[in-house]
Amino acid sequence: MAETLKLGKESQLMRRESIAFEESTVAILNEQQTQRTSKDADALNQASEDKKGLASATTHKPTDFELLVVVGQGAFGKVIQVRHKPTGEICAMKIVSKEYLVKKNYIANMQTERDIMTKVDHPFLVKLKYAFQSPANVYLVMPYIPGGELFHTLHKEGLLLEHTACFYAAEIVLALEYLHGRGIIHRDLKPENILLDADGHVCLTDFGLSKELPEDDEAKTVCGTNEYMAPEMIRNKPYTHAVDWWALGALIYEMVTGYPPFRHNNRKKLLEKICTEKLSLPKFLNADTHSILKQLLERNVDKRLGSGKSTMFKVKGVAAIKQHPFFKNIDWGLLAQKKLTPPVKPKLNDAQLDTSCFAESFTKMQVSVDDTTDGEHGALFHRFSYTAADFHGRRSSIQVPTEQIDEEETVQSGDDESNPLEDEPSQVVENQANPEEPLESPRNRSD
């Protein structure tokens, strides 16, 4: 067990360092997708305010918030713990550069993230409180979640006890069930996108790669984080919400072992392993854990646990996941009401201000925001502002790492027959069915 714990920590450290290296060598693909920029801009300009009527006429500005501590950073910008000056409440503010969104053709994705966050209302999903913009940036303000990322917890502990992983997984199941029931695929489930609140409950974040998909429809764009991508996505096959259940399997595996189910420093070989390598299950895991990992990490989508719909003859979908013996000690009704006690409660001196559960590589950063611009991109962002009707500035934090694509190892998307596992470098192809979607988002931070 000690050797496994050490291996888990080394694997996580290596992965973060590897991604940091990849970021220094990425190619910016704006020249290959210039046509998408205007389409994305049109999509954002025409977007309506939240149909539920939660948006008010109140518009906020950066100076309404006092910057406190950096709690996250990625290619997109920073996530900063802030104080809402009018109320004194502590929040988390995600700041995204407009220049970055235009350069990466992520304008429509930013709008999708904002729109989904205005619609969700679930105890295990982060909610949007404010959205506004300045000439240089767009801002998303959320409740501050003080327990930090599950990734940071895994980084410190190495691995989790199976009953602890089961509890977290069960709350994530409820969050995904809620999203899927509203036609939303998350597509980037991973420890970095799971926060722990002051009591130890999970809060799923980052809808930057999420997709609103009508029932029985399929998506095509290859996106997400390499270690958690489902085989059908890697192979450019149309896919459904079942990709989230594969990612859940990879997440459970990492929680109980300390490392992902398939690992390699080379991205191409990692994707090959996900598609072809036999799943290795450590002997120290119990039979129920073995069983759920095998069924979630099933390459045949029709046989994967969580896929399909229940019939009068067979239980399928999320109901089959809930009935799996791995969750035999979970009372789903009580869990949904947050009436089950989490196995671990974050050690916090002050649930409002404490940032000790976030990586020091973030919290020691200089707290600043670059709001300088020539105004070139300001006209692209209309109808972005939002204020939740019930907002009084409560707590949260969010980390949204977005992957940039390696010039020599790009995963294609679209309807063409090319395979991301081929030897020859591939070129990004616009997905005609879903032109608003990005390509990838990996683990690009280090503690």
Image (cartoon, rainbow, N blue to C red):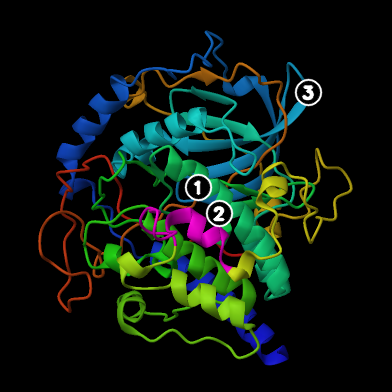
Query: Farthest residue in the top direction?
Result: 57
- Inter-mark Cα distance, 3 to 1: 35 Å
Residue placed furthest toward the front: 312
Q: Position of residue 394 (x, y in %)?
A: 72, 29
Task: Give the residues in magenta.
Answer: 306-324
- Helix, strand or loop: magenta stretch: loop
Would you say residue 308 sits in the magenta stretch?
A: yes
Splitting the image into 4 quarters, where does residue 328 fall? Answer: bottom right
Label drawn at residue 97: none
Residue at 63% in and 75% down = 256
User: Of the residues shown, which amino acid type is indicated by label 1?
Assistant: Glu
For residue 173, the mark is 2
Q: Position of residue 60 (x, y in %)?
A: 57, 17
Q: Which circle, 3 or 1, is nearer the viewer? A: 1
User: Where in the figure is residue 336, as x and y percent of width and height?
Assistant: 67, 44
Is residue 348 something that shows in the picture?
A: yes
Name the residue rendered at 38%, 34% in the picture: 112
Asked whether 434 or 371 is in front, the reply is: 434
Question: Which quarter shows the N terminus?
Answer: bottom right
Q: Residues within 10 Å of mark 3 (few under 14, many from 20)?
A: some
Q: Which residue is mark 1?
A: 177
Q: Is residue 118 left or right of residue 382?
A: right
**Above or below, comparing residue 220 to residue 215 in the picture:** below
Residue 372 visible? The answer is no
The residue indicated by pointer 3 is: 88
SS class, disc 3: loop
Image quarter of the C terminus: bottom right
Q: Position of residue 136 (x, y in %)?
A: 44, 29
Which image quarter: residue 435? top left
Tags 1 and 2 touching, CB below 8 Å: yes
Q: Residues within 10 Å of mark 2 (few under 14, many from 20)?
A: many
Type of the residue with mark 3: Gly
